Amino acid sequence: AAYSREGQDSLRFFPNMTTEIHVRPDGVGVLTLNNAPVNSLSASLMASFGENIQKLVADPKVKAIVVTGKGGFFCGGAEITEFGKITKQGPEAFKDVSPVQGLCTVFDLVDASPKTVVAAVNGIALGGGLEVALACHYRVGVAAASVGFPEVQLGLLPGGEGTQRIPRLAPLEVCLPMLITGAPVKMAQALKAGIVDAIAKGDVVEEAAQFALSKPPAPISKRPVLQANRFKALGGALDMVLNQASQQAKGMIAPEAIINCVRAACSTMSFQEGCKVESKEFTRLLFGVQSAALRHLFFAERMANKVAGLTAKPAPIKKVGIVGAGLMGGGIAICFVQKGIAVVLKDAKQEWLDSGMKNITAIWMGQVKRGRLAEEKAKGYVGLIKPTLNYDDFMDCDIIIEAVPEIMTLKKEVFQALDKCTKPDTLICTNTSGLNIDEIAAELKDPSRCMGTHFFSPANVMQLLENVKTAKASEKTIATCMAMGKVISKKAVLVGNCDGFVGNRMLAPYASEAKQLLEDGATIEQVDRVAESFGMAMGPMTLGDLVGQELFWKQRKAAGDMMKQTK
């Protein structure tokens, strides 16, 4: 969380205390972060934290201190909603102070405690949550927990002195990936790397308390950066990691800012001087357009998954039917199978079905060769797919997704057949990328069980899922499709039934202008290179080849307008 001096003043009386303290019979004071659901570091929590840590330090009955989280979560980090309040003040307000000075002040109080402070990491500790743990002198965690710095995914860096503390504990080969990619590490790896000091075998608070009573204070700020980290930094390790990050996250400025902070930590600078570098870099990122955009995306994704006024409960999905074993159908099948859901995969010809199964199997076998998937698990995945040529095999499916070519007459034929070979409550959905779904749904006796489920290619990779609401779709149908997106780890967005829905309506003008550049004399390679340099994962021409140029031709032909462009 972050808050300014003005924000601290407004919380002087802490009307909503969000930490709790009690003193055990053995003299260990326990401070518990309490801000459900993830104990995020709101301004009020940090104000309470600062007051209560000082109470425990001043209490003569308290011999040592344990910091933990309420429930099964240690701390999920910043209260991101409060960043907006900070940015409204403008960067000029933070020339001489960090935008998250409130965090740093409290962390410094913990760090400077004359009594040993141990973090009892009872669950996930992310971002500012990990910084809370690093501010403590020692860390004892539960085996199932993980720790990480996901700030880079919001275009930021750990601004609560995390970039200066972590290199004093862990080797660069562990802490740099945490900082640069945002990927968390499991507790066993954290122990091996020196990020935590012990893994609890029983009650984590009890074991942390005993640990605290047996150890002297050992603030990380007073420890030198690991000598090996200094040598690696001098030897070019930071430049190598930055070069890799530049290739993997093109155009992103947060990785370079993070490297600047770690470089400061590994230099001859003091801890306090390194923290000033971190503060300057954090301020630059927080007030930049990239972080603003990524924070907007963070909230937008969560809002998109909520449908206002929807109260119906989703139906359970135990078996899925898919019509069409091509690129899209196969990708959709992979999504469900990898979540342990059985799939019935149908196509019109045996050779098409065999080809589809071969392509699906090849994807998993490729992962086996790269060491990303166990061979037994891959075989288990294949075993969850039942290839078939018969519609009757869909009779016990809970949802069926049609993924045949974008030809209206063909889709209508499929829906007519499905209407005869499914349970009355089976959802029948279409993966069309732009055809009128109401017209397709009209082929069913009960069109309320139909809506669009538009996956993006390749379906097993791309995260977006457009759930297209039809005129007669029931609330239960909508609820089930939205829940389905969550089950298969997609970012589901409910959209209206219109030409191109939302994704393709945005993409079409982009693709149209790219084609116009070709007409004006640019080469395919030039157009794609510019798009990729801007930050696109692939250029518009490559994307068109991946989707299939014939798809757009068929759409125009079906519409009776060979000049048609989705707008």
Image (cartoon, rainbow, N blue to C red):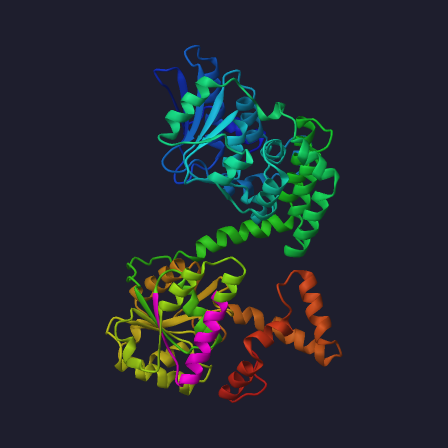
Picture layout, residue 382 above or below residue 137: below
Who is closer to the viewer here, 296 or 380? 380
Is residue 459 rendered to the left or right of residue 527? left
Picture layout, residue 280 above or below residue 290: above
Picture layout, residue 63 above or below residue 378: above
Is residue 366 rendered to the left or right of residue 253? left
Q: Is residue 415 magenta?
A: no
Residue 88 visible in the current orientation: no
The quadrant of the rendering that contains the C terminus is bottom right
The quadrant where residue 228 appears? top right
Residue 303 rendering spot, x and y as whole percentages? 44, 54
Query: For the stretch drawn in magenta, what is the main secondary structure?
Result: helix
Residue at point 34% right, 63% down? Answer: 341
Residue 181 rendering spot, x and y as whole percentages? 58, 48
Q: Is residue 358 magenta?
A: yes
Q: Residue furthest top?
A: 60
Q: Residue furthest left?
A: 424
Residue 556 rendering spot, x and y as whole percentages? 54, 85
Residue 500 visible in the current orientation: yes
Who is closer to the viewer here, 324 or 411? 324
The quadrant where residue 547 appears? bottom right
Picture layout, residue 325 above or below residue 182: below
Residue interval drawn in magenta: 342-364
Residue 335 rendering spot, x and y as whole percentages? 42, 64
Residue at point 70% right, 51% down? Answer: 243
Residue at point 66% right, 51% down? Answer: 245
Who is closer to the viewer here, 545 or 84? 545
Is residue 493 rendered to the left or right of residue 291? left
Count of numbered circles in the view: 0
